Image (cartoon, helix red, strand yellow):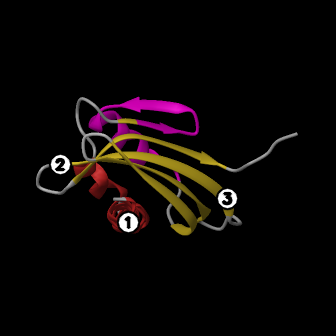
Amino acid sequence: MQTQATAYMDNFLKLYYEIFQRNRAELAGIFDDNVSIFSFEGVCCVGKENIMKKLTSLPFKSLAFVITTTDTQPTIDNGYISMVVGQLRTDDDPPHGFSQIFHVKKTPDGNPIVLNSSFRLALHSQ
């Protein structure tokens, strides 16, 4: 069961970050109007419309993700939770560490729906 969860989420995460880098607007299909919740640097968005407004309004033009590691566990009701750690680079900025969690449910036709996600840069201020 763990191997299936890891394989499913590895495929999902690869696709998610590829689409995020290429055209964030294409991510709309993985969020639900009523149940999806996404936190980005402490700003919480509920529902597909609000999530997509946030994601498409991010100010950078170019973006590159490098995933360092992921940990995935199955949850009830055909769900999976994954913790992602990696680096990203936006525009001409130096690379920054980030972490992101996903709670994804697999629909009966096998497609993913993001129930919850939270993204944070690994920045430290003094």
SS for tag 1?
A: helix
Inter-mark Cα distance, 1 to 2: 19 Å
Q: How far apart are marks 2 and 3 (CA)?
A: 31 Å
Which residue is at a point 67% across and 58% down the rendered structure image? 97
Disc 2 target residue: 107
Q: Where is residue 119 in the image (x, y as percent from the top left)?
A: 53, 45
Q: Earlier in the sequence, mark 3 or mark 1?
A: 1
Q: Quadrant of residue 10?
A: bottom left
Q: Which amino acid does label 1 sit on?
A: Thr
Residue 84 or 41: which is nearer the viewer? 84
Q: Give the label, 1 or 2, closer to the camera.
A: 1
x, y percent for residue 99: 59, 52
* Picture coordinates of residue 28, whole percent (x, y): 26, 49
Q: How crowded is mark 1: few (under 14 residues within 10 Å), some or many (20 or more)?
A: few
Image quadrant in which you'd find residue 50: top left
Identify the amino acid type marked 2: Thr
- Image position of 37 with respect to 110: above or below: above
Amino acid at dot 3: Gly
Read off the residue under disc 3: 97
The residue that disc 1 covers is 3
Residue 92 numbered mark, or none: none
Q: Is 60 displayed left or right of 33 in the figure?
A: right
